[in-house]
Image: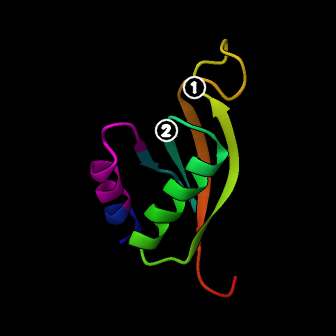
Amino acid sequence: MLRTALLVGCLLFSACTIVKPGKGDTNTIQHDGGAEQAYDLATRVCRRAGQQNAEIISTVNKDASLPPGTGKQVTTFRCLAAGR
């Protein structure tokens, strides 16, 4: 179910965001913008998958040659159930 919701999230945000289900309990999201946008997008994807919130593990530039926080960002996150 989580993978289906993540793919739906990818379709909804396809203009600027790509969500990739990962192995285990982590996923990645590719996006423009900073940490706040990453958290908002990841939380939206998790809620569509029936979870409560997202926990951000890391955010890095897709292009490592750019200054930190510029260009496309790749955020790794996991979804958390309520009460966790």
Amino acid type, mark 1:
Lys
Q: Residue at x 70, y 45 (%)?
A: 58
The answer to whether 72 is drawn above or below residue 8 in the figure is above
Dot 1 lies on which element? loop
Q: How is the image coloured?
A: rainbow
Quadrant of the drawing holding the C terminus: bottom right
Quadrant of the drawing holding the N terminus: bottom left
Q: Which residue is drawn at 57% across and 37% down?
A: 74
Amino acid type, mark 2:
Gln
Name the residue furthest bottom. Answer: 83
Quarter occupied by residue 14: top left
**Residue highlighted by disc 2:** 30
**Which residue range is magenta in the image?**
6-18
Residue 43 image offset from top left, x and y in percent: 53, 64
**Residue highlighted by disc 1:** 62
Q: Quick one: label 2, few (<14), some, or many (20+) residues within 10 Å?
A: many
Q: Which residue is drawn at 42% across and 47% down?
A: 19
Instruction: Please report contact status of discs 2 and 1: CB closer than 8 Å, yes or no.
Output: yes
Q: Does the magenta stretch include residue 12?
A: yes
Q: Is residue 13 left or right of residue 63?
A: left
The answer to whether 46 is drawn above or below residue 12 in the figure is below
Q: How far apart are the alpha carbons under marks 2 and 1?
A: 8 Å
Residue 49 image offset from top left, x and y in percent: 41, 71
